Image: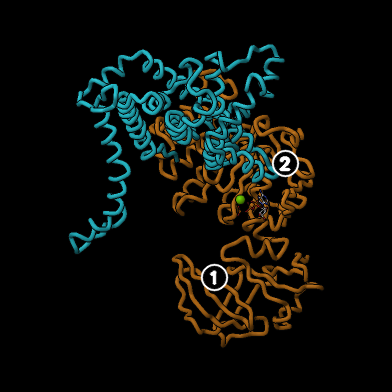
Chain colours: A cyan, B orange
């Protein structure tokens, strides 16, 4: 326990935290409360006046099949993105752990995709897989796959998942590398003497000991897939074809800023906010008492 | 017949460090061989090469007469106890002990029988469900031992297994390890830098220094006939007194063999009396400090520019500042040449 600091002055402590509180209030609580307020308003078709409708917007949104579709899309998208980003990163980290020479270079090269802006990453994948000009799309077609993410919803989903996962791999990689390094070498050696082969060692020793890292990344990746992938989806598919890749965040944007149904959009934001709070709560619970071994 | 034979084994790390510079040791079946030496002399490296955790740069290691240089640690049928125990932190004590058996495809009920039997001998039966983090240091040490024993391997390897325990527990575990090793009759290699542990445990004592073997022998033989000044000063607590021949009176050096540069004698082999009884055959020494440890006392003395330690049994009336005449029986004298090698 850190020793408690006792201020003789009663007001000073409040003054000291005031700037922080002010910033949080102005940039977080105020917009959040505005969203909450907005979510209970309904504007007339001409945008001249709005009326207070309590939870009517929420009822409407939750009954909307498009919204439920977007929930499903988000679930599929987030789970696949997190799964792909994490498993590829783990594979790369395990292999990087074995590299003896020029380790640093190898790691640096794997980290830089994290610095690429989401929209740029999206464009990159879009060009590579564009049905008419993409070089990789050409290869896919040559391999006999009817590749057209502009028409085929499943392929569009595969494409955005790939782009979103690609962007997150570096981040996960860093954490997995650190996690692997934290596993004492003697444990691996003891397991080797105990007759466990390489694969067995990974699944019975390394993977369980990585659990805290894996769990932390699972939460971070899910949050990322939920909220930080707008740029990628916007650049790659724009939510289409149809509504095949329209995630919750994308729908908020579409309904609010494109279709100007502000009440619905605000209600969706509030639902999203609740989801973030729930996810963050789970994350804090586990990061706080991160599984400690040994 | 699990013998372990090292033939001119060498290890050079990729960084260029020559950790082991040609070591040959033949360990008999059922013997407990202790490698002892100062920190960094290559003991762990040698042990890890026997375990198969470190590639052998040159030479050959054979277990049961079969060269194992190219065989992985799993197939060598050895068990190792690490200094930090290396218990699997996410497994219960039971699973820690069962892990090696499961990997070898031992039937379930036999695993259960063996784990429980081993736990019983080590008095771990009430701890089987605990996780390693819920154990004391001594209990972890036992689990590490149990994990090695339960597999019934050909060879046990120990890398300073007791160095994380307090002095009392260390003494207790030392006896227990010795008894277990005897009872199980498993050939063992034990690494330590503690010469007392080495002396009490070893059937065969191997004294190492800077990557080479200085002496191999039964502990008491090594104690009584150290082959080099290094061994003389490393084995025995307090160590053997070493005095340059140039500083000795001619009456003593006349007994020296040709080429002698250093005289060694054990603290308990120097008999002393009051200065007034100084004779031709004795050394003059001035007492600088007295250290009573109960059954005996150690006198820290100075002869010319050299320090020496004498042992007095029980309490002593000698006070610091006293001047003594030290006499050494000729048969208790050890002579070493200029390179530190034993003469005669
Ligand atoms: N992985 C390694 N790479 C390079 N040099 C090493 C490595 N491991 C050990 N060394 C060096 O080899 C020498 C012998 O090391 P070793 O660990 O065998 O010593 P030790 O006798 O076990 O010492 P201690 O009693 O301190 O454990 C040391 O000089 C050490 O610095
Ligand atoms: Mg060591």
Q: Residue under mark 2: which chain is it in?
A: B
Which quadrant of the figure has residue A292?
A: top left
In-front residue for pair A224/A262: A262
- The number of numbered badges drawn on the structure is 2
Parent chain of label 1: B
Residue A251 locus on image (x, y percent):
40, 23
Marks 1 and 2, how far apart at CA:
46 Å
Whether A218 is drawn above or below B139: the answer is: above
Residue A145: % across, % down: 65, 12
Residue in the foreground of this view, choosing between B272 and B163:
B163
- Name of the residue lying farthest toward the left: A10
Q: Is mark 2 on a helix, strand or loop?
A: loop
State which tag comes first along the sequence, 1 or 2: 2
Residue B126 left/right relative to A34? right
Name above or below for residue A237 compared with residue B52.
Answer: above
**Dots 1, 2 in contact, CB < 8 A:** no
Q: Label 1's element?
A: strand
Q: Mark 1 points at which residue?
A: B311
Q: Is residue A159 left or right of residue B40?
A: left
Horizontal relation, residue A142 to residue B151: left or right: right
Kindly identify the residue that appears in the image at 57 percent across and 63 percent down. Answer: B237
Q: Are discs 1 and 2 located on one and the same chain?
A: yes
- The residue lying at 75 percent from left, 75 percent from top is B255
Mark 2, residue position = B55
């Amino acid at each position: 326990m850190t020793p408690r600091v006792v201020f003789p002055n009663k007001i000073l402590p409040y003054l000291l935290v005031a700037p922080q509180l002010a910033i949080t209030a102005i940039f977080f609580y105020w917009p959040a409360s505005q969203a909450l307020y907005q979510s209970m308003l309904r504007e007339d078709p001409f945008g001249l006046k709005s009326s207070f409708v309590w939870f009517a917007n929420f009822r409407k949104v939750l009954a909307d099949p498009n919204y439920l579709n977007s929930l499903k899309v988000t679930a599929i998208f987030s789970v696949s993105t997190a799964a792909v980003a994490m498993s590829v990163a783990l594979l790369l980290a395990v292999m990087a752990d074995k590299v003896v020479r020029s380790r640093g270079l190898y790691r640096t090269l794997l980290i830089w995709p994290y610095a690429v802006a989401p929209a740029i990453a999206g464009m990159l994948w879009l060009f590579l897989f564009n049905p008419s000009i993409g070089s990789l799309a050409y290869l896919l077609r040559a391999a006999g796959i009817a590749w057209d993410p502009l028409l085929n919803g499943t392929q569009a989903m595969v494409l955005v998942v790939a782009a979103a996962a690609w962007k997150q791999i570096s981040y996960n990689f860093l954490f997995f590398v650190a996690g692997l390094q934290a596993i004492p070498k003697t444990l691996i050696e003891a397991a080797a003497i105990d007759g466990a082969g390489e694969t067995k060692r990974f699944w019975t020793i390394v993977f369980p000991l990585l659990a805290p890292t894996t769990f932390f990344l699972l939460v971070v990746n899910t949050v990322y897939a939920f909220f930080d992938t707008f740029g990628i989806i916007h650049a790659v598919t724009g939510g289409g074809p149809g509504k095949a890749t329209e995630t919750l965040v994308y729908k908020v944007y579409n309904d609010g800023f494109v279709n100007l149904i502000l009440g619905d959009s605000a209600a969706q934001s509030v639902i999203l906010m609740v989801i973030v709070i729930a996810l963050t709560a789970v994350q804090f619970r586990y990061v706080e008492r991160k599984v400690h071994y040994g | 017949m699990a013998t372990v034979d090292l033939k001119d084994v060498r290890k050079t790390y990729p960084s260029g460090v020559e950790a082991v510079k040609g070591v040959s040791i033949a360990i008999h079946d059922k013997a407990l061989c202790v490698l002892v030496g100062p920190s960094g002399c290559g003991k762990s490296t040698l042990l890890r090469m026997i375990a198969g955790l470190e590639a052998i740069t040159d030479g050959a290691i054979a277990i049961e007469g079969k060269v194992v240089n190219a065989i992985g640690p799993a197939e060598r049928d050895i068990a190792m106890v690490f200094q930090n125990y290396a218990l699997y932190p996410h497994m219960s004590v039971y699973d820690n002990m069962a892990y090696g058996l499961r990997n070898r495809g031992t039937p379930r009920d036999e695993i259960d029988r063996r784990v429980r039997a081993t736990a019983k001998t080590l008095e771990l039966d009430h701890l089987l469900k605990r996780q390693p983090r819920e154990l004391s240091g001594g209990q972890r040490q036992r689990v590490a031992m149990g994990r090695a024993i339960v597999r019934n391997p050909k060879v046990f390897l120990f890398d300073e297994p007791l160095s994380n325990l307090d002095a009392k527990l260390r003494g207790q575990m030392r006896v227990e390890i010795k008894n277990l090793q005897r009872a199980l009759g498993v050939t063992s290699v034990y690494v330590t830098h503690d010469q007392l542990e080495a002396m009490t445990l070893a059937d065969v004592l191997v004294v190492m220094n800077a990557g080479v073997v200085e002496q191999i022998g039964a502990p008491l033989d090594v104690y009584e006939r150290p082959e080099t000044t290094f061994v003389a000063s490393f084995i025995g607590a307090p160590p053997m007194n070493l005095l340059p021949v140039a500083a000795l009176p001619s009456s003593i050096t006349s007994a020296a063999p040709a080429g002698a540069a250093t005289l060694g004698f054990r603290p308990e082999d120097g008999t002393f009396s009051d200065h007034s009884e100084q004779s031709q055959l004795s050394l003059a020494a001035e007492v600088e400090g007295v250290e009573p440890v109960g059954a005996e006392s150690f006198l820290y003395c100075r002869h010319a520019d050299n320090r020496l330690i004498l042992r007095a049994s029980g309490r002593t009336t000698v006070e610091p500042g006293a001047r003594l005449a030290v006499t050494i029986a000729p048969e208790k004298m050890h002579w070493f040449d200029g390179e530190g090698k034993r003469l005669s």
